[in-house]
Image: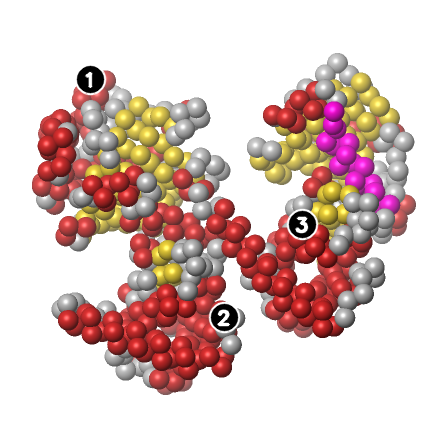
Amino acid sequence: MHDWLRLVGPNAEWHVAPQWYSDLFNGSELRWEQWQTQGGLEIIKQAPHRLIYRVTLSGNKLSSDSNAVSDSHATQQDIYIKCYPLTGLRWWSETWHLSFKTQAECHKALFLKQQGLPTAEPIAFGRNDNQVWIVTLGLAQTVPLDKWLSTTFLQLPSGEQCRIRLVLPKLLARLIAHLHQVGAFHHDLHAGNILIRYHPQGLLELYITDTHAITLCAKPLSWRQARRNLILFGRWFLERCQPTDRRRFFHHYIRYRTDWNVSRQQERKYARHLESATWRSLLRFYCRREDRPWQNNRYFYGTRLTEGNLQIIPAAVERPLFNLSLTGSSESLDDKSTNKNLDGSVWDIWAVEGLSLSDLRQIIETAPIVLYKSDPNQVKAPSFWQRFFHIANRRISRRLSRTATTGITVADIANQRIFLNWQDRGRRGGFWETQLIIDGQPTPVIVKAFRLRSLRQRLAELLHLGPASRSWTNAFRLTDRGFATARTLALLHWRTGWLPSWAFLICEKLYAYWDLHQALDFLQNQDKSHQVSVLSTLIHHLAQFFGRLHRHGLSYRDAKSAHILVAQDYLCGKVPDPDIRIVDLVGLSRPFLLTRRRRVKNLARLQVSLRNHPLLSRTDRLRFLKAYLHATGEHISTWKWWWRQIERVSQRKVCRNLRLQRPIV
């Protein structure tokens, strides 16, 4: 352990290892200006709670840890500086010297190294009135484990991958078992906080990071404490590795916990409970994140536009980047005409960060014109609002009569200056196609217009329960869980009174995809060998897709062939992955309990849409069902019950559509 050198400056207090003082400090301050001038200062991670710098030193410096030097654990040039801003109770405790966050993190890291656990070596820590700092040595040629498994591991030869699948679980089990045996509980133990160094000779080295999240206990962790940590660690691996790999890891973990005496029967019981508890924890983790598309964060933002001015939701947050006028350029408009044009109209906007409000301006300006051109009655308020909010209709009419001042007119649309292809869907609304600039690239998009006719529909949309809001939330649910779907870019509510009267959902348009029925028609005209190989793989991937969807607790009641897309390159034999995507997410939901009955209905809906296709046989349907049961963890011997239930619900659905004279699609 270091004998720290204490430095007290006018604005900060530092503790540094003596051998590193000359390289890091100029008096009592860090050499920020020198590092920045030499180009060796770089920000590698930036978040509201933490800022991490990487500094490349000009000279070589050996670590004071002899083991680290001999094993080449410490880099010769790179150091990392972590900065934690002080807010709330943490600021009070640091100001009154009741705690010292980075000092505790430093002592934990040194304790782990003393116990033989590989981690980054701290060389300095300090604080000032607003921040606390810690400086650690870098670990050369290491990358986070999750990134390495997602990139480098997949590029290795198949033989090397098999060898690593046998070795890596054992190394991880030994590392975590040692961590738990010394009484250390890591509150943020996941694959991103474990670094790996892969040598060309095949040697793997693992390191633990983020030691500030470690709590040191007086004795080794019990099974109850270790189970919580193993659940946290296993969530990332749950869908990215085979069950045998997870079972192998747990077997080695039990063997390395020499303070335990666990029989094989009890080990199998622990493994089953750990697997089910990890799934429940993963589902809770995703459920806690479902409010993100409705909040202001680094992925999404929400704004409210009224009378030409932008107000951020919540009002306390300022976004000067979007301080622009809605209607046209400032050279062609005066303030009076702009205020009159937007009088009484409010736009609530939620969008992804890559799509700025200036890019959405085209949609906001053209939406009333497109609706009025297709059917002037669409933009008139319903009778309920005509009775209680008479001013709303006059404001809408005044808005449409002054479309010439918005910079985009009906004549522009007629002259095709703006690409529009309106498709009417009756009382529900419709959609049109256009282009938006996303991250500097022109991207074709589809704008879906949802007409909110009744008071119930408007209240539901206001409470984020309407069809457009559900689609916006469901798109995030799918992408967050790793499912492929059309990228949803923005949601707009057009309010002419207290409640929204129209909702617009902007989605990226998918090219080079066919729906499931078109894909089967294409395969029907191919040669027999290509048809059999592609169809069997497609059935397997489709069953895995629905099995994983149901295992995540998601129900898709509108699972018909027209809403399931398959890549054209896969059908032509150019790529091995069908890249299955689902669209029209209004029918997707996450019930409190996904019962077998609801899962049977989802599968029956898919079977009804493909019931008369000549390419699919009963053997193909059985192959799909068995692959689905395997993906959901159900026992294969129950396939007869599932087969009968799906057939019964399918017949009921067909009879109902025939009775109501609805098409069977």
Quadrant including the N terminus? top right
Looking at the rendered image, the disc whose residue lies closer to the viewer, 1 or 2, is: 2
Where on the picture, by quarter, is residue 132? top right
**Which is the main secondary structure of the residues drawn in magenta?**
helix
**Three-letter amino acid code at disc 2?**
Ala
In this rendering, would 626 be left or right of 205? left
What secondary structure is marked by label 2?
A: helix
**Three-letter amino acid code at disc 3?**
Leu
N-term mark: 2 or 3: 3
Viewer-side residue, 604 vs 327: 604
Q: Are marks 2 and 3 in contact (CB under 8 Å)?
A: no
Give neighbour class at mark 1: few <14, some 14-19, many 20+ (Cα, 10 Å): few
Give neighbour class at mark 3: few <14, some 14-19, many 20+ (Cα, 10 Å): many
* Percent coordinates x, y for residue 203 in the rendering: 77, 62
Mark 1 to mark 3: distance in Å? 58 Å
Tag 2 residue: 631
Tag 1 residue: 336
N-term mark: 1 or 3: 3
Tag 3 residue: 189
Which residue is at 60% across, 68% downward?
242
Give neighbour class at mark 2: few <14, some 14-19, many 20+ (Cα, 10 Å): some
User: Quick check: is 99 in the magenta stretch?
Assistant: yes
Above or below, 294 relative to 263:
above
What residue range appears in magenta?
98-114
